[in-house]
Image: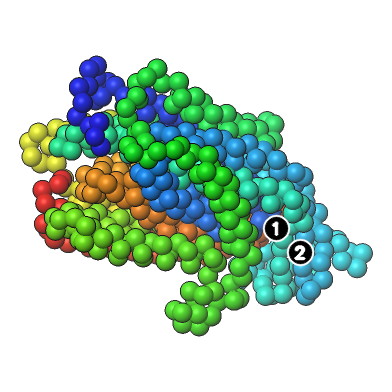
């Protein structure tokens, strides 16, 4: 933080001009990240034909992508410095995205009935991003039988004249895909490179933004809001472009686009014209350059993460034991590591601050930890956008806006477009209210965010009453939900980044930024598990019964919305306690 408060020279939108450079770097990195995010669950579902487990795998990926910043922040604080860490992360992420280009041949669907395997023949309509299976059949004893899903999860096997040859209970029917294990492993390794690279990039680019402002500079929240605006500019371009490229050229081309975007982010940072000189430099007195050793350790971490991804995919719900202890030991290795690490950080960091710092510093750290815990509730619901909301859009909405067909992935652009439109207004509003002494406190902004995102999902849950005969609701319900979610995100995400730089002890800013992202890691894992529970059986990525799919998603949205609104109300209720712990930080 030593560079904060230096002579600023020229300003950019009333802020240090270095913010513009960091804005561009983050925009291109988010172009890559959100492009991949828009494709990932559909890629796993339609190319690799991974069923409900695709949701858990996506949740595990984003969980690890937000867990690794805890280590990346520490390495930056101790050895690399923020700027060099961001460069390392950009290189690793670009490599991961390019590895995702190699997916091999599409998996071939099959079903198992009473232990016997049958290959599935599909007649398709649509495109790679919009597959529409008209019929799905198997050949049994010389007879072609069409598969028809039922509301209770069982399936009918229907003859050519419409007669039901057999009704197979859900427990005796299993759908899967025959896929290349080599290309599956290559995909997991690509995800691992990206997750490790994100650990270097994510916490440290935000830390550099924090160093642009003196500790008491009231522009800090507005600056982080503008920075957050860059995130969403990048995401709009990729979420619009990548689905189109996939339909034109194939899945590989979509991942190629995001890899190129990541390389541009690296180049913008590397050739900065000296604008960032003196910002995010390595700590003084560290001696020899340890970058090479850290990169080698990162390659070992890639192998470990790939193993964890494979473990998540192969952990069966049937192994879940009884009681809390039995459930915990049945969890994948990632879940055990994640929850134990988060508990250690939540209890350990405030105690460490109490021993090594002042009482005021310890209380401020405790306030930050409490807000970080509530951050889990927000992102558990919000991160359904990467799994449940994409699949809900694909399977149970009309996907037509103003008479134009759009893809489920492109629908996610409603969120960043809303943020771009309202982030400057909200940043201006915070400054305007701050001058009058009326700006809501950090904890009130968090509470508002929780209530808004909860309401956004409650509205989706109410949409089922207006479903058409194909069990699809108007896409405008999804638009409204994304819009409210964007407003909620503006009240918590940029404010949270700013909050960490305000409340954390100076020598622990990077670590606390990592803990902030660790809370999002916990949320992403839980979000993936919830999305898997809400999923319905599929064959070749197609749901067997759209009515069952609609019911499951709406029930999940209702429960999640109610719990999140309740969390927001609780946070507002304890706001006076947090105000005392924060010692005037607002």
Q: Mark 1 and 2 residues: CB-CB less than 8 Å, in contact?
A: yes
Q: Which residue is mark 2?
A: 111
Q: Secondary structure at mark 2?
A: strand
- Residue placed at 53% from the left, 70% from the top? 331
- Residue placed at 86% from the left, 62% from the top? 139
Q: Residues within 10 Å of mark 1 (few under 14, many from 20)?
A: many
Which sits in the foreground, 297 or 518?
297
Would you place residue 115 above or below residue 391 in this image? below
Q: Secondary structure at mark 1?
A: strand
Q: Which residue is mark 1?
A: 539
Residue 484: x and y, percent?
34, 45
Decide if residue 192 is in sight here: no
Which sits in the foreground, 144 or 202?
202
Q: Classify residue 465 by image quadrant.
A: bottom left
* Left/right of residue 85 with respect to residue 363 in the rendered view: right
Position of the N terminus by quadrant: top left
- Residue placed at 75% from the left, 44% from the top? 104
Q: Residues within 10 Å of mark 2 (few under 14, many from 20)?
A: some
Which sits in the foreground, 103 or 501?
501
* Left/right of residue 126 with respect to residue 440 in the rendered view: right
Residue 200: x and y, percent?
45, 42
């Amino acid at each position: 933080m030593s560079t904060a408060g230096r002579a600023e020279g020229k300003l950019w939108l009333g802020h240090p001009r270095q913010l513009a450079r960091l804005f561009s770097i983050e925009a291109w990195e988010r172009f890559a990240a959100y492009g991949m995010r828009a494709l990932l669950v559909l890629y796993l579902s339609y190319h690799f034909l991974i069923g409900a487990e695709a949701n858990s795998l996506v949740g595990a990926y984003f969980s690890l992508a937000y867990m690794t910043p805890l280590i990346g922040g520490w390495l930056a604080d101790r050895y690399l410095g923020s700027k060099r860490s961001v460069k390392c992360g950009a290189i690793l992420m670009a490599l991961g995205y390019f590895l995702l280009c190699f997916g091999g041949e599409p998996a071939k669907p099959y079903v198992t009935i009473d232990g016997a395997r049958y290959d599935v023949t599909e007649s398709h309509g649509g495109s790679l991003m919009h597959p529409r299976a008209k019929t799905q059949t198997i050949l049994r004893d010389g007879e072609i039988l069409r598969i028809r899903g039922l509301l209770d999860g069982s399936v009918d096997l229907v003859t050519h004249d419409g007669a039901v040859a057999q009704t197979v209970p859900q427990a005796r029917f299993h759908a899967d895909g025959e896929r290349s294990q080599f290309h599956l492993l290559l995909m997991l390794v690509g995800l691992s490179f990206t997750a490790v690279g994100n650990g270097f990039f994510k916490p440290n680019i935000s830390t550099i933004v924090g160093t642009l402002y003196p500790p008491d500079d009231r522009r800090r929240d507005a600056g982080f809001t503008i920075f957050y605006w860059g995130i969403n500019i990048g995401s709009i371009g990729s979420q619009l472009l990548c689905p189109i490229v996939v339909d034109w050229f194939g899945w590989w081309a979509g991942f190629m686009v995001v890899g190129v975007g990541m390389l541009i982010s690296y180049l913008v940072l590397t050739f900065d014209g000296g604008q960032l000189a003196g910002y995010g430099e390595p700590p003084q007195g560290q001696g020899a350059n340890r970058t090479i050793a850290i990169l080698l350790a990162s390659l070992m971490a890639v192998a470990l993460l790939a193993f964890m991804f494979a473990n998540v995919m192969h952990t069966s719900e049937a192994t879940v034991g009884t009681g809390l202890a039995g459930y915990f030991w049945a969890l994948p290795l990632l879940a055990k590591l994640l929850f134990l690490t988060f508990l250690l950080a939540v209890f350990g960091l405030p105690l460490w601050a109490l021993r090594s710092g002042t009482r005021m510093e310890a209380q401020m750290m405790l306030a930050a930890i409490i807000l970080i815990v509530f951050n889990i509730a927000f992102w558990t619901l919000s991160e359904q956008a990467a799994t449940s909301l994409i699949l809900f859009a694909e399977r149970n909405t009309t996907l037509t806006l103003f008479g134009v067909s759009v893809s489920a992935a492109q629908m996610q652009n409603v969120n960043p477009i809303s943020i771009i439109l309202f982030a400057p207004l909200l940043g201006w509003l915070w400054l305007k209210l701050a001058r009058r002494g009326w700006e809501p406190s950090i904890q009130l902004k968090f509470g508002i965010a929780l209530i808004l995102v909860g309401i956004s999902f409650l509205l989706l849950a109410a949409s089922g009453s207006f479903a058409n005969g194909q069990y699809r609701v108007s896409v405008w319900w999804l638009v409204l939900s994304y819009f409210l979610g964007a407003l909620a995100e503006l009240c918590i995400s940029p404010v949270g980044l700013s909050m960490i730089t305000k409340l954390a002890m100076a020598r622990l800013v990077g670590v606390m930024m990592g803990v902030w992202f660790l809370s999002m890691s916990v949320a992403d894992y839980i979000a993936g598990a919830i999305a898997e529970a809400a999923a319905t059986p599929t064959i070749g990525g197609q749901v067997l019964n759209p009515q069952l799919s609609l019911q499951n998603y709406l029930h999940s949205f209702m429960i999640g919305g109610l719990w999140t609104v309740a969390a927001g109300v609780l946070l507002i209720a304890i706001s006076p306690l947090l105000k005392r712990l924060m010692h005037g930080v607002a």
